[in-house]
């Protein structure tokens, strides 16, 4: 049975109609759910009898905080949530000058196998439901007291591998009677599932598509990202061109700077050639430490040199500020459990 918090207003209306309730009750229930209530008893403008029926037929579960860590450097907060079935995912709340951003997980574990990422180490378990994504935003906001204005789908999992549930989550979190977070304040990251990028393009959403490129050519990308064997670099970039043509939205390319792997002047030259003519922004990410990985971050000098090459060629490039490194909350460090695999 679908969780009531994963339902649209129209779907809740249909449920309530079966219970003999007027249509306006659906908006009331939806609004309460998206305020993060922990029980129907808090829905003070609903009849007692309806609250009781909903409690019995559509029980609410509030994710449990198993661990909360706050960075002593920048105030970033990382949550380890326990879901209703006992599985766990991590979420990160980041504070920026323009507002507070939440990085959410879309799956329990990840099947993509990228060599530089901790999220894939413990394997893939299942996809998250829309309400499980929504709850990460809601309860990070409630626990921290920090109003959330931006969302990034860059936590554990590949969002486009969970396409239908992610699209429903976007619809819910954008709803005017819910959290009402603008699509332009939402970024969705993908490692490059070409058919799903094309499918997403058809929706013409105003989100930012962030493509985890991390390499200028197949020889390098094959080595660190298994997905490249299914969808090689040129196929991926062609899909990005189609996406831009369909949506008019500039694409952000994520590029983890890995010492001796993808950070040479030749790598920059190849990347410039690949991105020529594609409205894009390159987000350079100094590789973050993952205990199980032998890969090392590029030097500051190599990152600066790489950035300058791109900018001199007319490609906007920034170096991502690393937040939460002291609590393993940075890009590529999230896990579905607090346990290390031996």
Image: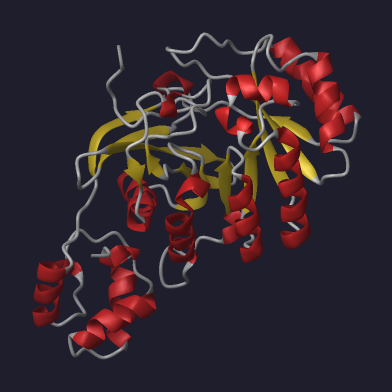
From the viewer's perspective, is residue 305 above or below residue 226? above
Q: Is residue 286 visible?
A: no
Q: Nearer the viewer, residue 62 or 56?
A: 56
From the viewer's perspective, is residue 39 above or below residue 127? below
Q: Is residue 236 left or right of residue 115?
A: right
From the viewer's perspective, is residue 44 above or below residue 209? below
Q: Residue at x 82, y 34 (%)?
A: 274
Give how far across and how far down residue 269 sits, in percent.
86, 23
Q: Residue at x 65, y 64 (%)?
A: 202
Quarter location, residue 271:
top right
Q: Nearer the viewer, residue 329 or 143?
A: 329
Q: Is residue 314 left or right of residue 337?
A: right
Image quadrant containing the N terminus? bottom left
Q: Residue at x 27, y 21 (%)?
A: 339
Give how far across and how far down residue 279 sits, in percent.
81, 46
Image quadrant containing the C terminus? top left
Q: Is residue 57 visible?
A: yes
Give how far across and how far down residue 317 sits, in percent.
76, 32
Name, please, the residue furthest toward the front. 230
């Amino acid at each position: 049975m679908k969780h009531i918090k994963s339902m649209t207003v129209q779907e809740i209306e249909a449920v309530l109609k079966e219970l003999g309730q007027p249509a306006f009750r659906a908006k009331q229930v939806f609004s309460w759910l998206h305020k993060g209530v922990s029980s129907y008893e808090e829905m003070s403008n609903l009849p007692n009898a309806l609250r009781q029926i909903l409690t019995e037929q559509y029980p609410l579960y509030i994710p449990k905080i198993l661990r909360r860590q706050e960075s002593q450097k920048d105030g970033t907060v990382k949550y380890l949530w326990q879901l209703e079935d006992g599985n766990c995912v991590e979420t990160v709340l980041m504070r920026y000058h323009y507002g507070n951003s939440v990085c959410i997980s879309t799956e329990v574990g990840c099947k993509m196998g990228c060599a530089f990422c901790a999220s894939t180490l413990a394997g893939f378990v299942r996809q998250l439901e829309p309400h499980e994504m929504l709850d990460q935003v809601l309860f990070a906001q409630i626990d921290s007291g920090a109003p959330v204005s931006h969302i990034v789908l860059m936590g554990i999992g590949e969002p486009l591998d969970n396409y239908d549930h992610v699209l429903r989550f976007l619809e819910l979190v954008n709803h005017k009677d819910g959290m009402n977070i603008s699509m332009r304040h939402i970024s969705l990251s993908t490692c490059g599932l070409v058919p799903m990028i094309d499918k997403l393009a058809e929706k013409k959403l105003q989100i930012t598509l962030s493509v985890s490129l991390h390499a200028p050519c197949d020889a390098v990308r094959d080595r660190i990202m298994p997905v490249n064997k299914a969808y090689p670099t040129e196929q991926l970039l062609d899909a990005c061109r189609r996406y831009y043509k369909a949506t008019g939205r500039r694409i952000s390319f994520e590029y983890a700077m890995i010492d001796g792997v993808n950070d040479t002047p030749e790598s920059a030259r190849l990347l410039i050639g690949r991105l020529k003519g594609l409205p894009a922004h390159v987000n350079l990410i100094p590789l973050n430490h993952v205990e199980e990985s032998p890969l090392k971050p590029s030097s500051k000098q190599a990152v600066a040199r790489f950035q300058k090459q791109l900018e001199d060629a007319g490609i906007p490039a920034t170096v991502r500020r690393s937040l939460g490194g002291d609590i393993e909350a940075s890009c590529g460090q999230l896990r579905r459990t607090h346990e290390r695999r031996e």
